[in-house]
Amino acid sequence: MFLDRIVATKREEVEALKRTLSISEVERTISELPPCRGFEQALIGRNRPVGLIAEVKKASPSKGLIRQDFHPVSLAQDYELAGTDCISVLTDTDYFQGSNEYLKQIREQVKVPLLRKDFTIDERQIYEARIIGADAILLIAAILTKSELSSFYTLARDLGMDVLVEVHNRPELETVLDIGKATLIGVNNRDLKTFFTDLNVTEQLIGLMPKGIVAVSESAISSVDDVAFVRGAGAQAVLVGEHFMRQANIQEAVNELLGPVTKEGAAR
Ligand SMILES: O=C(O)c1ccccc1NCC(=O)[C@H](O)[C@H](O)COP(=O)(O)O
């Protein structure tokens, strides 16, 4: 299964990190870094009725190469100019043709809070995320134990980052809610094991979330009707990658999908 292959690759990457990243050294470096930009806060005070995390995504396991003419900084600048609340940057190299360098370069050029989109399975990756300039990390419930979800969440928060915790089914959501830490939860409409996508997953899971959670609908969103559907289901924000990556004019595409900026920030 593809997800198992991705996690196996991450285990190899973590072994390499163990040789190159000293936690005491990175803790010193991190203590001198400026604070993170509020990722979750940007979604709460969103620029439009529905918040947007726009993704910088060159390729994917399900679709192969998505964007040939791929200039990550220029894409991120277009997203920023279009009033995107947050940007997600895929840093996995083997399966998404992403890079830590892309996130570092984008960090230098845009002010929008950044999500490091990767498959976190070890605490070293969390330190690494902070050092390369992430404001938030993704924790995927499908690949972590309950105890890992809890301890990785706490570590990321201790390092000043926000955490988007991703679920795809009811047992995963129940585990996350049982831990009782997550305030920002993403429902992935894509089953990462089969790649099958279904926006109804958003409707099913957001209905089970308590009040106070910032809920994000992720994946397979490509039309105004899709946005209206997940918004009607209770999503305060959407995470969109492939649809934007296939457009020639990114700024126009953002405004067509989400509507114009209204700065209708909403309380939870
Ligand atoms: O996108 C994939 O094919 C994929 C396969 C296996 C694991 C994760 C995968 N994608 C990560 C994501 O969650 C998406 O990049 C993100 O939600 C945006 O989705 P989309 O708008 O459909 O590009």
Image (cartoon, rainbow, N blue to C red):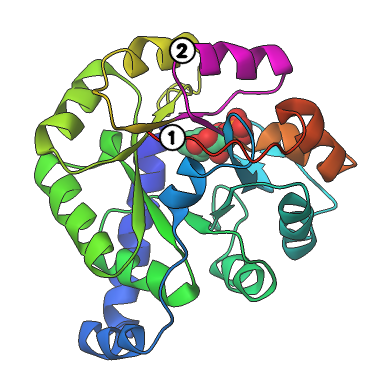
Q: Residue at x 64, y 41 (%)?
A: 263
Mark 2 surroundings: few (<14), some (14-19) or many (≥20) residues within 10 A: some
Rendering coords of residue 13 (x, y %) = 37, 65
Quadrant in the picture for the C terminus:
top left
**Mark carried by residue 100:** none
Q: CA distance from mark 1 to mark 2?
A: 29 Å
Q: Position of residue 206 (x, y in %)?
A: 35, 18
Q: Nearer the viewer, residue 132 or 226?
A: 226
Q: How many marks?
A: 2
In the picture as drawn, the residue positioned furthest to the right comes out as: 248
- Counting from the top left corner in percent of width and height, residue 57 is at 65, 47
| Amino acid type at mark 1 | Phe
Residue ID at (48%, 29%)? 236
In the rendered view, tell whether residue 37 sits above or below residue 144. below
The residue to which callout 1 is attached is 2
Q: Quadrant of residue 50?
A: top right
**Observer able to see residue 198:** no
Which residue is denoted by mark 2 in the rendering?
Answer: 233
Left or right? Give the position of 93 relative to 194.
right
Assess whether residue 220 is covered by the magenta stretch: yes
Q: Which residues are magenta?
A: 216-238
Specify which label sits upstream in the sequence, 1 or 2. Answer: 1
Circle 2 SS class: loop
